[in-house]
Image: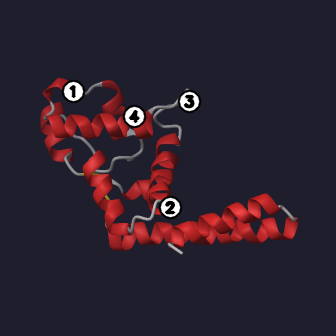
Amino acid sequence: MIAAKARFRYAKKLQRIAGYRVPDFAFNGGAFMDILVSSLDYDSLDRTMRSQIIQFYKDFLECKCKESPQCGCPERKFALKILELRRLGLDHRQISEILVDDYGVEIYPPTDILSFLEDSVHTLEAIRDVARIEGKEKLLQETIDAIREIEGK
């Protein structure tokens, strides 16, 4: 999944502030997310980093699951965010820039984001085909529309 490739740009800086090792990957088995939820002194962060971490927390970590943040919701929300940005018409480079600016998260645009978008289209094509076979017209149209938006057509 795309979330497994998301690196927090300021992990080393955050590590110095926290006083212990901080994983580079933002969705690394929950370790990075646990730090954000439990033990981080937000007052010691610079304004930009604090803003990015708070936005990351709000957009990806807030959920009602008992197992949060290791429930899978953060990774799903992250993937949906990338799809939402693409559906708004942004290309892979613009999506990458927004992820860095808003969350301090880096993903390599030419490979990882494009691969994720391509995989998403293939999944939607399979759903489209099943919807067509099953006569689910509403689902069929929704998948056709989503494919067009992701492909930029």
- The numbered mark, 4 or 3, whose residue comes first in the sequence reads 4
Dot 1 amino acid type: Tyr
Q: CA distance from mark 4 to mark 2?
A: 21 Å
Which residue has dot 2 on it? 87
Q: Where 153 sits versus 49, above or below?
A: below
Residue at (49, 46) in percent of width and height? 77
Choose mark 2 or mark 3, whichever is in front.
Answer: 2
Q: Residues within 10 Å of mark 4 (few under 14, many from 20)?
A: few
Q: CA distance from mark 4 to mark 3?
A: 14 Å
Residue at (21, 27) in percent of width and height? 42
Q: Residues within 10 Å of mark 3 (few under 14, many from 20)?
A: few
Q: Nearer the viewer, residue 130 or 139?
A: 139
Image-quadrant location for residue 64: top right
Q: CA distance from mark 1 to mark 2?
A: 33 Å
Residue at (18, 32) in percent of width and height? 18
- The numbered mark, 2 or 3, whose residue comes first in the sequence reads 3
Q: Nearer the viewer, residue 27 or 143?
A: 143
Q: Is residue 113 left or right of residue 76?
A: left
- The numbered mark, 4 or 2, whose residue comes first in the sequence reads 4
Q: Residues within 10 Å of mark 1 (few under 14, many from 20)?
A: some
Dot 2 amino acid type: Arg
Which residue has dot 4 on it? 58
Choose mark 4 or mark 2, whichever is in front.
Answer: 2
Which residue has dot 1 on it? 42
Q: CB under 8 Å between callouts 2 and 3?
A: no
Q: What is the number of the mark on residue 65?
A: 3
Q: Is residue 9 left or right of residue 112?
A: left
Dot 1 falls on a residue whose secondary structure is helix
